[in-house]
Image (cartoon, grey):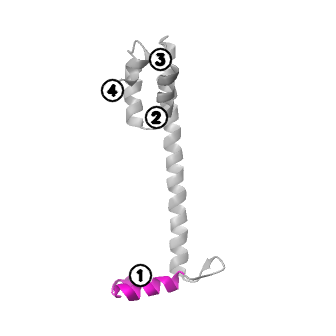
């Protein structure tokens, strides 16, 4: 909307307020309809990305616990919860690598 760039701040604010007026739930401006649709698409994409990241983190946490279980390493409920609630993939990767040699669950999550 290049025409709006040159407007004084007050005039631009009035114009934007006018253009956001709706009838029912439909924007009257094609520009605002397009912006609303794009905003909705971006929100959906962000939601999907967050869901994928949470799923990947859950899988990585389960992998840490699986390695420890396969090795016969005892894991306390506190450590198990810490691993499963972690959403940082980089941290989970560190813990997965530690799980290969850890003698107990505390060794995995130590700082």
On-image quarter of the N terminus: bottom left
Above or below, 70 relative to 16: above
Spatial separation of the CA atoms under disc 1 and disc 3: 58 Å
Pinpoint residue 56: horizontal percent, then vertical percent.
Answer: 50, 37
The image quarter containing residue 96 is top left
Pinpoint residue 63: horizontal percent, then vertical percent.
Answer: 49, 26
Indicate the secondary structure of the residue bearing disc 4: loop
Above or below, 105 relative to 47: above
Spatial separation of the CA atoms under disc 4 and disc 1: 52 Å
Indicate the secondary structure of the residue bearing disc 2: loop
Pinpoint residue 39: horizontal percent, then vertical percent.
Answer: 51, 66
Tell me which residue sits at (55%, 64%) in the image: 40
Q: Magenta part of the protein: which range?
A: 2-20
Name the dominant secondary structure of the magenta segment: helix
> Which numbered mark, 1 or 3, is in the foreground of this view?
3
Q: Is residue 5 magenta?
A: yes
Q: Is residue 110 magenta?
A: no
Label 1 or label 2, whichever comes before in sequence order: 1
Label 2 or label 3, whichever comes before in sequence order: 3
Q: Are marks 2 and 3 in contact (CB under 8 Å)?
A: no
- Dot 4, crowdedness within 10 Å: few (<14), some or many (≥20)? few
> Which residue is identified by label 4?
111
- Dot 1, crowdedness within 10 Å: few (<14), some or many (≥20)? few
In the rendered structure, find residue 68 and report the number of the disc placed on it. 3
> Which numbered mark, 1 or 2, is in the foreground of this view?
2
Indicate the secondary structure of the residue bearing disc 1: loop
Tell me which residue sits at (50%, 61%) in the image: 42
The image quarter containing residue 24 is bottom right
Label 3 or label 4, whichever comes before in sequence order: 3
> Which residue is identified by label 1?
1
> Which residue is identified by label 2?
86
Spatial separation of the CA atoms under disc 3 and disc 4: 18 Å
């Amino acid at each position: 909307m290049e025409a709006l760039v040159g407007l004084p701040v007050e005039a631009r604010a009035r114009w934007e307020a006018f253009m956001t007026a709706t009838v029912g739930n439909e924007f009257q401006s094609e520009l605002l309809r397009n912006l609303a649709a794009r905003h909705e698409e971006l929100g959906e994409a962000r939601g999907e990305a967050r869901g994928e990241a949470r799923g990947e983190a859950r899988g990585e946490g389960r992998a840490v616990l699986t390695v420890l279980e396969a090795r016969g390493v005892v894991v306390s409920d506190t450590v198990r919860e810490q691993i499963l609630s972690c959403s940082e993939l980089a941290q989970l990767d560190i813990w997965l690598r530690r799980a290969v040699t850890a003698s107990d669950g505390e060794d995995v999550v130590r700082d």
